[in-house]
């Protein structure tokens, strides 16, 4: 994805500062139009509707965990369901909710502690709408959101690993029972 994967975009934004402002703005506005028109990455568009403020930021490196928050890709069930249809996209603790990035990072009670810690650093409740403003406000803010993303993503990944481990154990038990049946002679009828 243009905005996130390509950090060169940011450098490009900086280099262009010397170039003619008009030309730069024209390029940005074309880019912005394409971003608004696209049907892809709409979660990211909701978080980062304005390309210019994002690529011209003066601080803030993207990492794996922040990218999870900003794209919603990765191990989230909503996304990984495409690869494994047996897995439900529902949140394991909120049956009426789809476990997507918005749910996990902004709503799910599983992560209220992490959210509270973030609130104590930002002094404001983070919503999808104010996320870029909060992140771009200062470097400590950016780092607070990065550390929040890290905690949530790490816990989700651990839970996912546990679940896979349980599933594998269950499958092993079943196949053991099946092979026991195969090798056990049928008891003689009385
Ligand atoms: Zn939930």
Image (cartoon, rainbow, N blue to C red):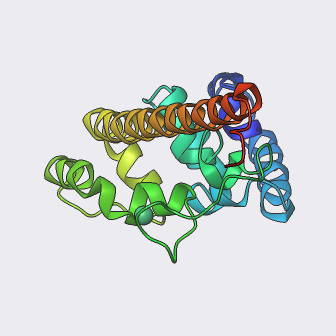
Residue pictured at 30% horizontal, 39% vertical: 138
The percent position of residue 93, horizontal first and vertical second, equals: 40, 64
Quadrant in which residue 154 is drawn? top left
The percent position of residue 38, horizontal first and vertical second, equals: 85, 59
Quadrant in which residue 119 is drawn? bottom left
Q: Can you say which quadrant of the picture contains the N terminus?
A: top right
| The residue positioned farthest toward the left in the image shown | 120
The reply to whether residue 106 is in sight is yes
The reply to whether residue 57 is in sight is no
Residue pictured at 47% horizontal, 66% vertical: 129
Residue pictured at 48% horizontal, 32% vertical: 65
Quadrant in which residue 27 is drawn? top right
For this view, does 37 lie left or right of residue 52? Answer: right
For this view, does 130 lie left or right of residue 63? Answer: left
The percent position of residue 82, horizontal first and vertical second, equals: 80, 49
Q: Is residue 89 above or below residue 150?
A: below
The percent position of residue 120, horizontal first and vertical second, equals: 13, 51
For this view, does 107 lie left or right of residue 184? Answer: left
For this view, does 65 lie left or right of residue 37? Answer: left
| Front residue of this view, candidates 131 and 188 | 188
| Front residue of this view, candidates 66 and 17 | 66
Residue pictured at 76% horizontal, 45% vertical: 84
| The residue positioned farthest toward the bottom in the image shown | 96
| The residue positioned farthest toward the front in the image shown | 190
Q: Tell me how many marks there are.
A: 0
Q: Is residue 115 above or below residue 69?
A: below
Q: Is residue 12 above or below residue 166?
A: above
Q: Quadrant of ligand 1?
A: bottom left
């Amino acid at each position: 994805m243009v905005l996130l994967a390509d950090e060169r975009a940011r450098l490009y934004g900086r280099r262009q500062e010397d170039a003619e402002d008009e030309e730069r703005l024209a390029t940005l506005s074309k880019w912005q139009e394409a971003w608004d028109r696209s049907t892809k990455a709409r979660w990211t568009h909701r978080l980062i509707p304005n390309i210019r403020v994002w690529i011209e930021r003066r601080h803030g490196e993207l990492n794996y965990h922040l990218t999870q928050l900003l794209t919603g890709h990765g191990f989230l069930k909503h996304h990984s369901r495409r690869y494994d249809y047996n897995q439900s996209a529902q949140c394991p603790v909120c049956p009426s909710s789809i476990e997507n990035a918005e749910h996990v990072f902004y709503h799910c009670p599983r992560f209220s502690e992490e959210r509270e810690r973030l609130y104590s650093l930002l002094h404001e409740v983070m919503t999808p709408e104010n996320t870029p403003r909060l992140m771009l406000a200062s470097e400590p803010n950016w780092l607070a959101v990065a550390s929040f993303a890290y905690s949530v993503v790490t816990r989700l990944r651990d839970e996912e690993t546990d679940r896979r481990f349980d599933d594998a154990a269950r499958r092993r038990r079943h196949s053991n029972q099946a092979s026991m049946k195969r090798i056990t002679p049928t008891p003689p009828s009385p």
